[in-house]
Image (cartoon, grey):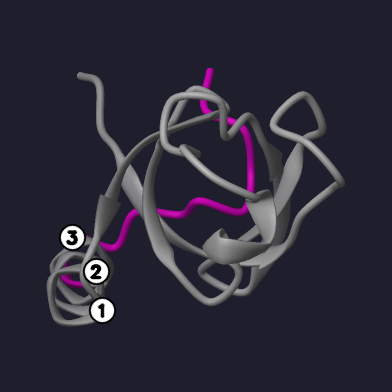
Amino acid sequence: MCIGVPGLVVGVGESIHHLAQVDVCGIRREVNIMLVCEEDPATLLGQWVLVHVGFAMSLVDEAEARATLEALQDLELDFTEPQR
């Protein structure tokens, strides 16, 4: 099963060629933002993105992100360890 997980962009580089830091369930991950960044990467700070296999696939609003995280937590999925 493939799943996208919402994450909050907490750090960016100077261009879309740098990985952004995204907080996913309290864990910071480096994520490629090339698919969602149309302007200066700094505009993504504080935005929610849907992360799948290390890529930010789309922007999501905060309410949708929080609802999705709550649903995933109800399933008791652990995103702190890599899945095998």
Left or right for 37, reference 15: left
Tell me which amino acid carries mark 3: Leu
Helix, strand or loop for disc 3: loop
Within-10-Å neighbours for mark 3: few <14, some 14–19, many 20+: few
Q: For residue 65, which numbered disc appears in the image?
A: 2
Which mark is first along the chain, 2 or 3?
2
Between tags 3 and 2, which lies in front?
2
Q: For residue 75, which numbered disc appears in the image?
A: 3
Question: Is the residue under label 2 in contact with that under label 3 (CB below 8 Å)?
Answer: no
Helix, strand or loop for disc 2: helix
Q: Is residue 65 above or below residue 40?
A: below
Marks 2 and 1, how far apart at CA? 5 Å
Check residue 24 for magenta coloring: no
Which mark is first along the chain, 1 or 3?
1
Which x, y percent locates residue 60?
Answer: 23, 59
Tell me which amino acid carries mark 2: Ala
Question: Is the residue under label 1 in contact with that under label 2 (CB below 8 Å)?
Answer: yes
**Which portion, as a residue range, is magenta?**
74-84
Which x, y percent locates residue 79?
Answer: 50, 51
Please report the residue visible at 64 percent of the width from the left and 50 percent of the height from the top.
Answer: 40
Within-10-Å neighbours for mark 1: few <14, some 14–19, many 20+: some
Which secondary structure type mostly characterizes the magenta part of the structure?
Answer: loop
Which x, y percent locates residue 7?
Answer: 46, 60
Left or right for 59, reference 15: left
Where does label 1 land, which residue? 62
Please report the residue visible at 51 percent of the width from the left and 69 percent of the height from the top.
Answer: 25
Please report the residue visible at 86 percent of the width from the left and 45 percent of the height from the top.
Answer: 14
Please report the residue visible at 17 percent of the width from the left and 71 percent of the height from the top.
Answer: 74
